[in-house]
Image (cartoon, grey):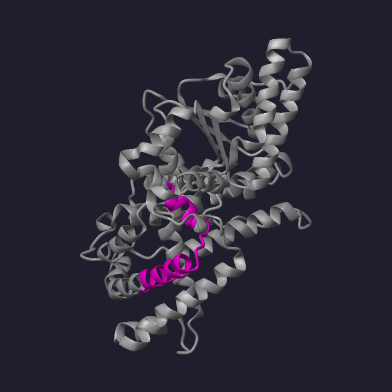
Amino acid sequence: MPKWNEQQLKAIHTKHKNILVSASAGSGKTTVLIARLMDLVMHDHVSIDAICAMTFTEAAANEMKKRLASELQKAYQNANEEEKIFISKQLTSIQTAHISTIHSFCLSILQNYYYMVGIRAERITHVMDNGQMTQYQALAMEEAFQIQYKKQEEVFVNLTQMFSARPENNEALQSMIVTLATLASSKSNSDVWLSSLSTAYQNIHRIEDLSIDLQENFFEYLLVECRRYEENIQKVNELYIVKYNEDVKKHTIVQQKILALPNLFTFLQTKDYTQFRQEFINISHAVVPPCPDKEDKEYAKLRKDILAIEDRMLANLFTEDEFMKDIAKLQPYIEKLVEMCKDYRHAYASLKEKNDCIDFDDMEHFALEILRANDGQIAHIYREQFVEIMVDEFQDSNDVQNDLVNLICKKDNVFRVGDIKQSIYGFRHAKPQLMRGLIDNRGDHDEVIYLSNN
């Protein structure tokens, strides 16, 4: 049996609350997840069929099933006859249980209730592979560009020139359209979100005039960069304490940067961009010194990463007035970009419908549509079925996935695990601020537990 610390025990045994576990790397969060599953099954006698555990990879789901089965088999050896019957039933149920990726769970909703949203049964049996997706996306992109070639509007010509000096090279513009389409797919109502983008750039005079979405993304980018910056500087500071404590002059420069860091996060929290910009410029003036030991590769890499973040940030930290002028000029091009993205999405959706197939985004959106249909009739069925809903790697969730969980949960039965610092920012347009929002805005039925590797 592992030797649990206080916070791990709290994560395993706390029930009848929404739990958010903020688990740093090496904190044993997977072991805690399995232990909580075992506690639900063996102590609370919750059937595995009444638990929904969502992961982000098939490998993680299979590992969870494998480890759960192993723990149940151990429990079986020491159980009485009545418990053995119950455990045997759970072992039999593991392979068909809702311990899967979120896409697999969405697909199971489609397989059971596809008729609720008018999808043909044949369509959900055909999930496109990467080759077919690439082919259809290329055809859809070609159609979106053909529409613009026929119009030959000046704004389109200028837009293509913004992405490439060569008229025949549209790769960068196409890539931007795909990126925008992918981001739209991470939103619950993709078309409404896309339409809001062009209007969000109208009548903008200051950063606070930006839409909530744009402000969130803007300050989230700065926050993620600053967290990486802080982490690297702290590691350099630790090296001075452990290995180079005699080099006081160099260490003092690093310590000065650390002392100034809290101001950066304060200005980000209050969304005071002007003060943030000036503070970052001031901090960057004190350059992290070269390592006292030229052979120290760890120090060299940390210093290189710190300088890279500073260079990247300083190159993009324009004054607020400069930002506003650029935004005003961009508005017609954003509008055209959104138009092309909608044309691309429509053409791609038509190809999938015509050829009776779906992709991973369709699984999520159709599942969401089913759960919302008929005043949430199907969502109610799942809500009654699941005693507990577990979400692993919550920091990588997007709006669609989060909305889906909120539709099938009760007020106090969601167990989320994540680490904001490990967010694969941009992967499927994950939204780490969902996790931060739950930490900052806790209700009566919510609790946050912090796991560390200490």
In front of the other: 82 or 399: 82
The answer to whether 107 is drawn above or below residue 200 in the figure is above
User: Any magenta on residue 248?
Assistant: no
Residue 295 % position (x, y):
79, 56
User: In this orientation, does residue 276 appear?
Assistant: no
- Which residue does the image show at 57% across and 57% down from the upper left? 287
Residue 242 % position (x, y):
72, 39
Residue 184 % position (x, y):
40, 60
Residue 191, located in which quarter of the rendered image? Answer: bottom left
| Viewport quadrant of the C terminus | top right
In front of the other: 215 or 18: 18
**What are the residue bounds of the magenta stretch?**
340-367
- Which residue does the image show at 33% across and 50% down from the upper left? 272
Relative side of 204 to 166, left or right: left
User: In this orientation, does residue 50 appear?
Assistant: yes
Which secondary structure dominates the residues rendered in magenta?
helix
- Which residue does the image show at 73% across and 25% down from the upper left? 71
| Viewport quadrant of the N terminus | top right
The answer to whether 390 is drawn above or below residue 397 in the figure is above
Relative side of 49 to 1, left or right: left
In front of the other: 266 or 358: 358
The answer to whether 276 is drawn above or below residue 411 in the figure is below
